[in-house]
Amino acid sequence: MIKPYRGSGIVLDIGTGDGRFVSASAKAQPDKFLIGIDANAKPLEKLSTRITRKRAKGGLANAMFVLAAVEDIPKEFDGLADRVHIHFPWGGLLRAVATGDSEILASLRRIASAGCLLEIVIGVDPIRDKAELERLGIQGVSIEKAVMALLPRYFEAGFRNVERKELSPAEWNDIETSWARKLKNNRKRRVIYLSFEAC
Ligand SMILES: C[S@@+](CC[C@H](N)C(=O)[O-])C[C@H]1O[C@@H](n2cnc3c(N)ncnc32)[C@H](O)[C@@H]1O
């Protein structure tokens, strides 16, 4: 689960950060096209240059990075994605997916093709992240309560829940992103996996 993508079509990684997931997936699957999107320009600058190199020097002909906030994904992406990943969101992106913001969910549905799989991995430490969660208006993330309350909001936006579960440290340590590595040693972090199908 949540290894570099091995399906078909176009894959978007929203809140891609340093793009590790996109690079690993693009390398593993040269016949797929990976697009990393982030609201922060800094990490995208180096990446966008690196992927234009020759393949032997880290170039990737099947990946691109786009500077955009989830609130403002260009209309050229409409109906494009066969798969959308959101790994370890933070800030506005966390608020949007963890509260089921109807406008953002509508944007995610807009960029998804029919049958598109949306995978979300949310990781929070309820004590350490308390102030930030309060600031974002998130009551606390638990599989039992908050997630169940979220599902109707996703359904209203056109996403049918396929799977929801709390990941064990062994499972989420295995996710191919830099934040999964960074957060690895915090055993108090609760990591929730949600997947939806666009209907
Ligand atoms: C904790 S990092 C995770 C990065 C990457 N997915 C990973 O797992 O390594 C959260 C990312 O979400 C991005 N982000 C926050 N708010 C966003 C928004 N409104 N739209 C798009 N990206 C956003 C941040 O810039 C940051 O790169």
Image (cartoon, rainbow, N blue to C red):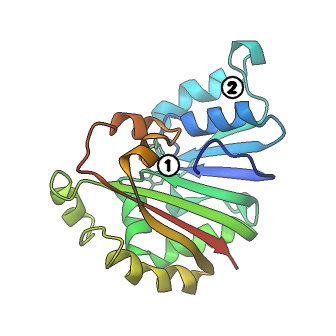
Confirm whether residue 4 shows in the render: yes
Residue 159: name its quadrant: bottom right
- From the top left corner, tell me how far across and down residue 127 is, in percent: 15, 56
Residue in front for this viewpoint, 169 or 138? 169
Label total for image: 2
Residue 15's tag is: 1
Residue kind at label 2, given as amino acid type:
Ile
* Farthest residue, direction top: 57
Look at the numbered disc 2 and give the secondary structure of its residue: loop
Q: Is mark 2 within 8 Å of ligand 1?
A: no
Residue 54 seen from this side: no
The amino acid on which the numbered mark 1 sits, given as a three-letter code, is Gly
Residue drawn at x 25%, y 42% as measured from the top left:
186
Q: Quadrant of residue 114?
A: bottom right
Residue at 58% across / 81% down in the picture? 157
Image coordinates of residue 56 in percent, x first then y, are 75, 13
Q: What residue is disc 2 on?
A: 51
Q: Is residue 157 left or right of residue 100?
A: right
Circle 1 SS class: loop
Q: Is mark 1 within 8 Å of ligand 1?
A: yes
Residue drawn at (60%, 71%), measured in percent from left and top? 196
Q: Is residue 144 left or right of residue 93?
A: left
Mark 2–mark 1 CB contact (< 8 Å): no
- From what the image shows, is residue 70 above or below residue 161? above
Marks 2 and 1 sit apart, C-alpha to C-alpha, by: 18 Å
Left or right placement of residue 149 versus residue 38 in this view: left
